[in-house]
Image (spheres, rainbow, N blue to C red):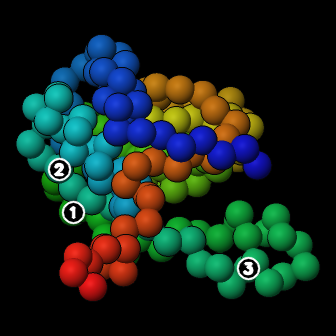
Amino acid sequence: MRQELITWSDVDKIIDHLVPQFDIEFNAMVVITRGGIIPGGLLAEALNITAIFTASVDFPAEMETEKNMSSRFMVWPKFIQFPDNNQLSGKAVLVVDDVWGSGRTITAVKNRVASANGMPYTCVLHFNPYRSLFGTLRPNYFAAITDAHIVYPWEIDRGTNKIILQNQ
């Protein structure tokens, strides 16, 4: 699979491309951990959204060991963290992630917002229609279509083991 490294400058351009697309005022934002945290923060600042919540979703992997690998896409999501329904009910909610690959995570979050009587709108930086499991369904807002595996600047290896100590 082709891989594409995105720089911080690219991220700035992507956000600048997304902001004019928003045609409504959002009352809240749900960012999907971990990939949606940084794009969500940037968009919240640009759109002046102050009610920001996180959704942490896991798709159990037990099904992957079965003979039929496609069955792993049939498992129900496990919501590790999600805002209370009353924080979303009756509100226009922007659901943000970095990329729509299979679409499972953002679609699960979108449906959970809708079940809380919120009005969800999905937003990603990159949309990969070639991997999507949802046919013609697409994000409400996206900056680019890709077939590549995107590596964002916040995904580059970091941590104390990467620090070069001076005077060694």
Estimate the x, y position of residue 84 in percent, counting from the top left.
Answer: 21, 63
Circle 3 residues within 10 Å: few <14, some 14–19, many ≥20 = some
Callout 1 amino acid: Asp
Name the residue rendered at 40%, 49% in the picture.
Answer: 153
Q: Which numbered dot is residue 84? A: 1
Front residue of this view, candidates 10 and 88? 10
User: For mark 3, what is the residue?
Assistant: 63
User: For mark 2, what is the residue?
Assistant: 52
C-alpha gap between disc 2 and disc 3 = 33 Å
C-alpha gap between disc 3 and disc 1 = 29 Å
Q: Considering only order in the chain, which callout, 1 or 3, is on the residue closer to the N terminus?
A: 3
Left or right of 146 in this view: 141: left
Estimate the x, y position of residue 69 in percent, counting from the top left.
Answer: 83, 70
Left or right of 43 in this view: 157: right
Callout 2 amino acid: Ile
The answer to the question of whether label 2 and label 3 lie on touching residues, with beta carbons closer than 8 A, is: no
